[in-house]
Image (cartoon, rainbow, N blue to C red):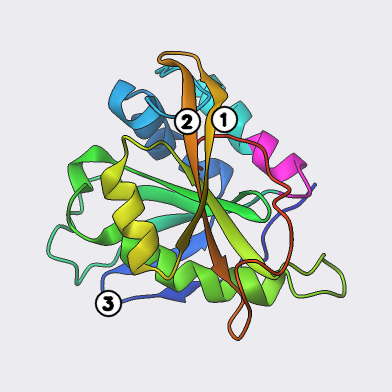
């Protein structure tokens, strides 16, 4: 079982980035039950809380999965004591592939870019050799239709590497093209190593 060290966190102006926990299942389920959130992932939307708990457990069981959540800080304009504590997911879904997912009530406010910029230093520090494999880049896969996600990736330092045609069978949309983005380790190059990930959705 791979549980992220609870001491590994990051703070931005509006967000706390901290490890994914089983206690987050209810808030995660809000996102996973929304068809628009899940549209471009390999998973069909479902409001089954047990499935969300099983998904979290699966993240903890995989050596190449290193997931975090986004929490609004009380100083954030949208924070509410009555709202979901967790507004998004971010992490290495199958390292070196990274991704994110956001509660639709918080789309379009820059949270994904803010979180990704904060997460990347954690990623490169963790996957730097020694106990864990070293990766020279983070990779993100997205559908050509998801222009907003492409903008997030570019703002966070990712570069479009290639387009793979009809290589991902989406359970709702059928066969889809995939855009492959990479962000190099600081001081490195996006083309230092061949791609090793397979098409998939966001975290």
Q: Is residue 155 left or right of residue 63?
A: left
Residue 187 lies in the magenta-colored region = no
Residue most extreme to the bottom: 187
Which circle, 3 or 2, is nearer the viewer?
A: 2
Measured Cα–Cα span from mark 3 to mark 2:
35 Å
Which circle, 1 or 2, is nearer the viewer?
A: 2
Which circle, 1 or 3, is nearer the viewer?
A: 3
Residue 61 lies in the magenta-colored region = yes
Q: Position of residue 192 (x, y in %)?
A: 71, 69
Measured Cα–Cα span from mark 1 to mark 2:
30 Å
Up/down of 41 relative to 137, above or below: above
Up/down of 9 relative to 25, above or below: below
Label 3: how many Cα within 10 Å (few below 14, some 14–19, many 20+) = few
**For marks 1 and 3 on the same chain, the one whose residue lies earlier in the sequence:** 3
- Say which residue label 3 marks: 13
- Say which residue label 2 marks: 177
Q: Position of residue 78 (x, y in %)?
A: 14, 57
Circle 2 sits in a helix, a strand or a loop, which is it?
Answer: strand
Q: Residue at x 21, y 48 (%)?
A: 106
Can residue 112 be seen in the rendering of this structure? no
Q: Residue at x 80, y 46 (%)?
A: 1
Range covered by the magenta-colored residues: 57-64
Please name the predominant secondary structure of the magenta segment in the image.
helix
**For marks 1 and 2 on the same chain, the one whose residue lies earlier in the sequence:** 1
Can residue 96 be seen in the rendering of this structure? yes
Q: Could you say which is closer to the camera, residue 134 or residue 74?
A: 134
Circle 1 sits in a helix, a strand or a loop, which is it?
Answer: helix
């Amino acid at each position: 079982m791979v549980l992220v060290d609870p001491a590994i966190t990051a703070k931005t102006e509006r967000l706390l980035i901290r490890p994914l926990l089983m206690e987050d299942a209810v808030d995660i389920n809000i996102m996973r039950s929304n068809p628009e959130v899940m549209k471009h992932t390999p998973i069909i939307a479902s409001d089954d809380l047990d499935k969300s708990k099983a998904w979290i457990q699966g993240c903890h069981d995989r050596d190449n999965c290193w997931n975090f959540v986004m929490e609004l800080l009380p100083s954030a304009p949208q924070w509410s004591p009555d709202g979901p504590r967790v507004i998004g997911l971010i992490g290495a879904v199958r390292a070196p592939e990274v991704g994110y997912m956001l509660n639709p009530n918080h789309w379009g406010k820059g949270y994904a870019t803010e979180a990704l910029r904060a997460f990347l230093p954690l990623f490169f520090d963790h996957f730097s050799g020694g106990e864990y494999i070293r990766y020279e880049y983070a990779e993100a896969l997205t559908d050509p239709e998801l222009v907003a996600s492409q903008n997030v990736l570019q703002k966070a330092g990712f570069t479009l590497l290639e387009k793979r045609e009809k290589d991902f069978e989406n359970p709702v949309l059928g066969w889809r093209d995939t855009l492959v983005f990479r962000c190099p380790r600081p001081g490195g190059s996006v083309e230092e190593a061949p791609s090793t990930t397979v098409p998939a959705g966001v975290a």
